[in-house]
Image: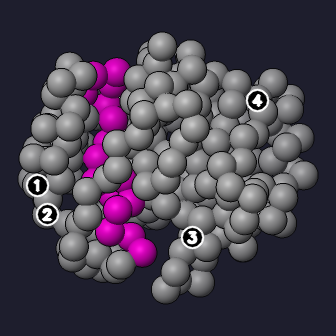
Amino acid sequence: MNYPYLPEEKVTLFIADTKIPDAAVITPPSIDVLPTAMRRHADLGIVIISSKKAVCPPETYAYYKNALSPYGFEIIKGKTHIESHYPKDSAYNVGIVGKKCFLNKKVCDKLLFDILISEGYEIIEVKQGYTKCSICPIDENSFITGDVSIYKAGKEEKMDVLLISNDNISLPGFSNGFFGGCTGMSSFNELLINGNVDTLPNASDMKNFLTKKNIKIRNLTEGEVKDIGSIIPLMTD
């Protein structure tokens, strides 16, 4: 993949806390200090930096090194430990879209931040700590978000951004989840959603936005849309 999270071909390997037909899935490890509904959220426990490089907190480093090294990944251990509550649970939750990275510098792990800079990412600072949860990347210049501040930051960067509501996105124990945490691209022209998009208030807006980009939606289930900590594409055919 030229850009993390944006595959050019059909994805054959994901990280996600769900089943995906016709693909292998690595289940995220449990980060036991987190609330029960968030313990296996992949987007809190790993950041894909490039096609074969990732950064993890100390809590998930050994797991992902063992799981991904056989595929040729370099796994780097970050410095910041995950803690139980926001914002100290979000040190690795950075939103990458193409070569731009949305993050809260006060929250982001320092080693991760330095690696992002060294890899040539343009850093866009926002107040939101859960930027990966809040961003569903579509292509290198487009994304969907339910966060107004991230939407405004993207528009200032001349990006094509759709602002939606987070209503009806399920995350047990919380008033709502985040759309980025329910989704992931499975190829250059297909977006996976963990649930049925038609249960969301902005379903028609999303369909129109994606249709203009020749991207189709594949619902993984027919029930409510659930935030599972993102569907992370790792490898393609």
Per the image, label 4 sits on a secondary structure element best described as loop
For the residues marked 1 and 3, what is the alpha-carbon distance in whole angstroms?
A: 25 Å
Q: Which residues are magenta?
A: 37-53
Q: Which residue is mark 2?
A: 81
What residue is rendered at 18% in x and 24% in y? 70
Q: Which residue is mark 3?
A: 177
Per the image, label 2 sits on a secondary structure element best described as loop
Q: Between label 2 and label 4, give the one nearer the viewer.
A: 4
Tell me the amino acid under the disc marked 2.
His
Left or right of 149? Residue 120 is left
- Marks 4/3 in contact by CB < 8 Å: the verdict is no
Residue 45 within the segment the image draws in magenta? yes
- Residue 43 vertical placement versus 139 (above, below): below
Residue 31 disc label: none
What residue is rendered at 84% in x and 58% in y? 198
Depth check: give the residue in front, 212 or 39.
39
Q: Quadrant of residue 232?
A: top left
Q: Position of residue 35 (x, y in %)?
A: 34, 80
For the residues marked 4 and 3, what is the alpha-carbon distance in whole angstroms?
A: 23 Å
- Marks 2/1 in contact by CB < 8 Å: the verdict is yes
Q: Which residue is mark 4?
A: 215
